[in-house]
Amino acid sequence: GITYTYNEPTIFMEFAHDVGVLARQRGLFNTFVTNGYMTPEAVKYASEFLDAATVDFKGNADEKFLRKYVFVPDAEPIFETLAEMKKYGIWVEVTDLVVPEVGDDLEKARWLVRRVIDILGPDVPIHFLRFHPDYNLQHLPPTPVETLERHVEVAKEEGARFAYVGNVPGHRYEHTYCPECGRVVIRRRGFSILEINLVERGGEHRCKFCGAKIPIRGRVMPTWRDEFRFVYVPIQTFTRWVRREVNK
């Protein structure tokens, strides 16, 4: 499949739409990594090709953090996007970049999780991502792993069934655990899937150990060898291919 990211995909929405429609016709899936600032019209337009999206929050969606560092008044448009994506059947996962000292308040995280679950339900995957110092925030430290772990615990307290730690390769909260028996059903390290303990029954994924349903969109497959996971395609080459396909 194709993931549209780096930079915000809504910046090149028309191009993504042209590519995505062609990709879907050929049996490929399409996913966005987006900040979620989309109008309902944009979500409807994207739904013509979009299968899934990761919607990124920053600093637990704290208004003060968003106004100072993201230059937006609040996160309400993002919550509206979540609801619109759900309406069109787009699979959604949520990430939250936890920024130490300025965007790591646990009560704000609790509020964010509640809002997300109210819209998408308790099965939505929520990933708490580790911040690393860069650009204008080099004076801040990396997010302590303990802070991320506490965020996961808070999410579980609020009813989230699939909460994760991100950007900490090898951490136990990278894995997917069965919410019924607690066993690992998908073992990961970074972007790699190392072990799968799922069975398919009637088109559903279930825990191999207890049979509980695990909500997953699409197939789960072991990771390809690293040299084949990412293929660099010059944008000029990709653009020529799209134009040729559109003009057929």
Image (cartoon, rainbow, N blue to C red):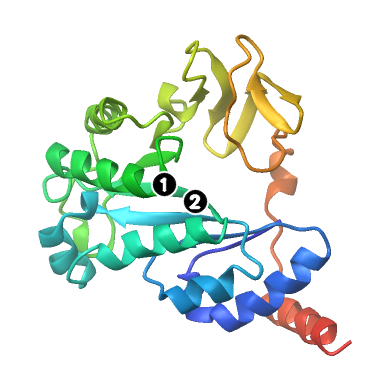
Q: Nearer the viewer, mark 1 or mark 2?
A: 1
**Point 69% across, 43% down: residue:** 218
Q: Position of residue 36 (x, y in %)?
A: 39, 64
Q: Which mark is residue 120?
A: 1
Q: Residues within 10 Å of mark 2 (few under 14, many from 20)?
A: many
Indicate which disc, 1 or 2, sits on the residue closer to the N terminus. Answer: 2
| Residue 46 in the image, given as x and y percentages of width and height | 57, 71
Which residue is drawn at the image coordinates 26% and 31% (left, top)?
158
Q: Secondary structure at mark 1?
A: helix
In percent of the image, x 78 and y 87: which residue is there? Answer: 243
Q: Quadrant of residue 206?
A: top right
Horizontal side, residue 139 vs residue 91: left or right: left
Residue displayed at 39% across by 40% down: 126
Residue, disc 2:
92
Q: Look at label 2 and name its amino acid.
A: Val
Contact, CB < 8 Å: mark 1 with mark 2? yes
Task: Quarter of the image for the C terminus: give it.
Answer: bottom right
User: At which x and y percent is residue 63?
Assistant: 14, 60
x then y, percent, for residue 10: 48, 75
